[in-house]
Amino acid sequence: MYYTYVLKSLKNNKFYIGITNNLSRRLSLHNKGRVKSTKSYAPWEVYYFEYFNTRKQAVSREKIIKSWKSREMIEKLKFNRSRGSSNSIEI
């Protein structure tokens, strides 16, 4: 299983979008400063995620979300998820 995820920095409210096959491990790496592009903005929280059967599907969704230029569009993801999506796991 692969995840497309959106992290939100608790330091400055920036978003980071990525993919992984282990969401809890990846969040830990971000928060420990082991990811070069995010270490300056730690700590992070998982803001939103979706899961997919293949890496190709997750990458495709990541590209779609990254193509959005509006922060408002990313913020709507969480609102829409709370209105019926079943993509939830314990992290």
Image (cartoon, rainbow, N blue to C red):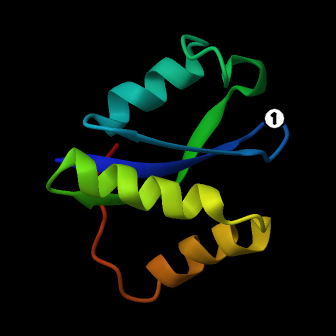
Residue at screen point 58% across, 80% down: 79
Say whether residue 53 is left or right of residue 39: left
Secondary structure at numbered mark 1: loop
Q: Where does the image place residue 54, in percent across and percent down from the top left?
A: 17, 51
Q: Where does the image place residue 10, in percent across and percent down from the top left?
A: 74, 40
Density class for disc 1 (Cα within 10 Å; few <14, some 14-19, many ≥20) is few
Q: Where does the image place residue 80, in percent across and percent down from the top left?
A: 51, 83
Residue at screen point 80% across, 47% down: 13
Residue at screen point 25% across, 50% down: 56
Residue bearing the label numbered 1 = 11
Q: Is residue 75 visible?
A: yes
| Above or below for 17 versus 26 | below
| Above or below for 40 versus 3 | above
Residue, far right: 12
Look at label 1 and name its amino acid: Lys
Q: Is residue 49 visible?
A: no
Residue, far bottom: 83
Say whether residue 53 is left or right of residue 46: left
Where residue 77 sits, quadrant-wise, is bottom right
